[in-house]
Structures are given as C-alpha cells and as structure tokens.
Amino acid sequence: MKPIRNVRLLIVAAVLSLAGGFCLANLTGCQHAVTLEAGGAYSDAYLATTDQAILDTAKTLDGFLSWYNANATFLAKYPAVGQLAAKVTAHQNEWLRDAYAARDVYANAEVAYKAGKGAAPSVAAVNSALSVLNDIATQINSAKTAHP
C-alpha cells in the first residue's frame, strides 16, 4: 500500500471531522495507518478509510442542513450561508452517489487485481470524488465557524 493514499484520506477525514464537529479519534483511532481486523469486512485500508470519509461527509452534510434549518431565521441575515444550504440541498445526493460509485469501481478493480484478472486499481477517481466532498466540507466548516 502506498502511504500517500492514507495521508490524503486522513487530511480529508480531519477536515470532515472539523466540519461535522466529530473527533478525528472516532474516525481513525488517532493512528497514522489504518489497522484492519483479520477476517473483518475490509482487506484494504484505503477502502475502509474511504468508506469512513464518505459516511462522515454524509453526516456533515445532514448536520449542516439541520443546523441551518434550526437557525434559518437568525441566518437569514447571512445570504452566503443560505446559498450554501441551497447548494448542499441540491447536490448532496449527487456528491455522495459519485463518491460511492468511484469507491465501488476501485473496490471491484482491487478484487480483480488480487485475483490476477486486472491491473492495479487507480485511486484517481476516488480521490477526485473525495476532493469534492472535502471542498464542500471546508465551505461548511467556514460557514459554521463564521456564524456559530
């Protein structure tokens, strides 16, 4: 496994944890490398971390929309927050669907590769999808920090 893959995902996870108010320790146990349980559901640390990042982003998006809806009257004086809420509402399913689709392509390629039936899987599409999630999580973090 290439260490750079986990570093990128840990950066995404850190941003997502800040945006959603989650402790990074809940995501990775404060480890530098993901440890997989023998016989567990995951045989690939990159895939396990990717799944956690996508799930945490989904929670972040839902949490942001709940926060916005609960405080809409107060936040009305901040049009940028309302625009961000509208953007998240309009695109959250698309962003998550794209991330899961890229994750599935990677997972299928990993299985084929391990079976000797294909080339090593590329993380480019997954990283691209996670980058979109990271960008929106960063925007959410900025909005929530500026307007607690």
Image (cartoon, rainbow, N blue to C red):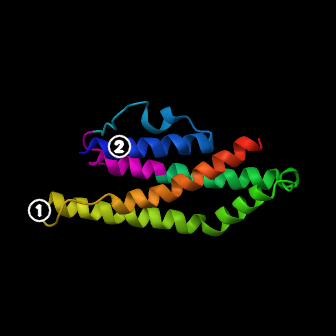
Secondary element at image label 2: helix
Q: Position of residue 77 (x, y in %)?
A: 87, 54
Question: In the drawing, does residue 148 fall left or right of residue 134?
Answer: right
The residue lying at 26 percent from left, 48 percent from top is: 43
Say which residue label 1 marks.
Answer: 116
On screen, residue 136 above or below 31? below
Q: Residues within 10 Å of mark 1 (few under 14, many from 20)?
A: few
Q: Nearer the viewer, residue 19 or 56?
A: 19
User: What residue is shown at x 42% (from left), y 52% (from top)?
Assistant: 51
In the rendered structure, the answer to whether residue 121 lies left or right of residue 46 reads: left
Considering the image in quadrants, where does the C terminus appear? top right
Q: Residues within 10 Å of mark 2 (few under 14, many from 20)?
A: some
Res. 13 visible in picture = yes
Residue range corresponding to the magenta coloring: 38-53
Regarding mark 1 in the picture, which secondary structure is present there? loop
**Disc 1 versus disc 2: distance between alpha carbons?**
24 Å
Say which residue appears at 31% left-offset and 48% top-offset: 42
Q: Which residue is mark 2?
A: 6
Residue 97, numbered label: none
Above/below status of 111 relative to 57 = below
The tag earlier along the polypeptide, 1 or 2, is 2
| Front label number (1 vs 2) | 2
Q: Is 20 situated above or below 30? A: below
